[in-house]
Amino acid sequence: MHCRFPFVCVSIGLTIGRIPTVGVVYNPIMDELFTAIRGKGAFLNGKPIKVSSQSELVKSLLATEVATNREKSIVDAVTNRINSLLFKVRSLRMTGSCALDLCGIACGRTDMFYLTGFGGPWDVAAGAVIVTEAGGLVFDPSGKDFDITSPRVAASNPHIKDAFIEALQQSE
């Protein structure tokens, strides 16, 4: 199968009482199946995965996306924030998929991720449990607790969370 940009997925998440509990994310082009059940660990094609151990912001890979809203004021705010963050991290990645970005955190491909203005809980439910079960943290970009009903999410390994939140707050 030919695909110009192979970062697509099917994402299925189950929440119980607004808590992400079961997550399955499958990229059929790369044949990668990410799975997690709350309290049971996270897996990629059946093998356990863990978040990165990177503890320095300047050496970290940041993943984000540009929201689908193309109103000039929103695009300007998003690109200004990215511009500010680029001076504090090693590099930036965009796959076009919130679910795959969260899975990238879970398996250590990237170190930090944030997104505001995504579609809804279906975009984050599976990825959130996969990150958590891989030893990562999922939170609001402000540093507050993650809310599955809010269109705002951030994730990282535990070592870099505080520095990441500080950088996000300075970039607003």
Image: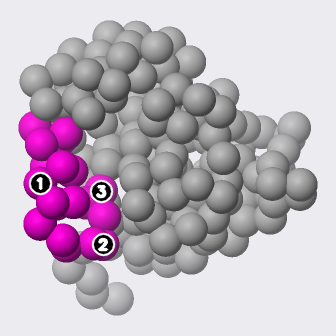
Which color scheme does this rendered protein use? one colour
Is residue 70 part of the magenta span, yes or no? yes
Q: Secondary structure at mark 3?
A: loop
Seen in the picture, residue 138 relative to 77 is either above or below; the reply is above
Going by the image, does 28 lie left or right of 126? left
Task: Give the residue at x 40% y 53%.
Answer: 116
Q: Pick whichever of labels 1 and 2 is earlier in the sequence.
A: 2
- Residue 85 located left or right of residue 130: left
Residue displayed at 56% across by 68% down: 120
The amino acid at mark 2 is Thr
* Mark linked to residue 130: none
Residue range of the region highlighted in magenta in the rendering:
65-83
Q: Nearer the viewer, mark 3 or mark 2?
A: 2
Which residue is disc 1 drawn over?
A: 76
Q: Secondary structure at mark 1?
A: helix
- Compute the Cα span from label 1 to label 2: 13 Å
- How far apart marks 1 and 3 lie (CA) works out to 13 Å
Locate the C terminus and report the quarter of the image it occupies: top left
Of labels 1 and 3, earlier in sequence is: 3
Inspect this view and state whether residue 53 appears: no
- Quarter of image, res 35: bottom right
| Residue at mark 2 | 68
**Quadrant holding the N terminus:** bottom left
Relative to 94, residue 52 above or below? above
Alpha carbon of mark 3 to alpha carbon of mark 2: how far?
9 Å
User: How far across and down, in percent of the image, does residue 37 sit?
Assistant: 82, 50
Q: On the image, numbered disc 3 is attached to which residue?
A: 65
Of 39 and 164, nearer the camera is 164
Residue at horizontal 69%, vertical 71%?
A: 12
